[in-house]
Amino acid sequence: MQCPSCQNTDSRVLESRAADGGRSVRRRRECLNCDFRFTTYERVETVPIMVIKRDGSREIFNRNKVLHGLNRACDKIRLDESRIENLVEHLELHLQQRAEKEIASAEIGELILEGLKQINEVAYIRFASVYRQFRGIDDFVSTLETMNTEQGHLAAVV
């Protein structure tokens, strides 16, 4: 690691600790040449996930966009924010573990809906109405009937 003060490449690590929720390592270093102390961060380098949008354009996956959409769907619903954060965390981990690094936005939306269904039905409907571009009451009724049927199957199994 190059010293920011004298550009010498010899330094020693004084202290290491987890940072960013365990996603990186913070290291306190001291230059062996000039005794200047500085901090470095070490992170796992990941291959960016490319999202293929409905119009065919591509953009890099942005967890903040997902969080924003989920927060809007959960607005005024008493829901623990950590559950939303965990959903996004699991989604991002799932996407990183895939061999394919390009994914359709439609598939991401369905993964989010699957997670929301387990967390809160109202948030699920609100997110689905925007994501699936509901055009009227029939779309809401159809989605509600599908959810009701799926729950009926679950109740029959349990």
Image (spheres, rainbow, N blue to C red):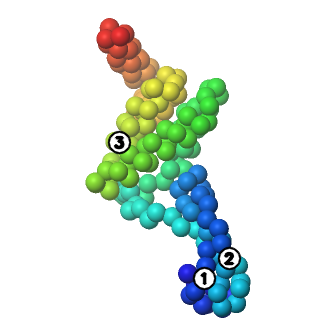
Q: Which of the two marks, 3 or 2, is nearer to us in this view? A: 2
Among the two numbered marks 2 and 1 on one chain, the one whose residue lies closer to the N terminus: 1
Q: Nearer the viewer, mark 1 or mark 3?
A: 1
Dot 1: what SS? strand
Which of these two is toward me, 93 or 28? Answer: 28
**Is disc 3 placed on a helix, strand or loop?**
helix
Q: Residue at x 52, y 24 (%)?
A: 120
Element type at mark 2:
strand
Check disc 1 and report the residue beneath it. 11
Give the x, y percent position of residue 103. Answer: 33, 50
The answer to whether the residues at label 1 and label 3 have Cβ atoms under 8 Å apart is no
The residues tagged by marks 3 and 2 sit, at their Cα atoms, a distance apart of 44 Å
Name the residue at 61% across, 79% down. 12
Do the residues bearing badges 2 and 1 touch, measured as CB atoms within 8 Å? yes
Camera-side residue of 84 and 42: 42
Q: Residues within 10 Å of mark 1 (few under 14, many from 20)?
A: some
- Residue 106 is labelled as 3
For the residues marked 2 and 1, what is the alpha-carbon distance in whole angstroms? 10 Å
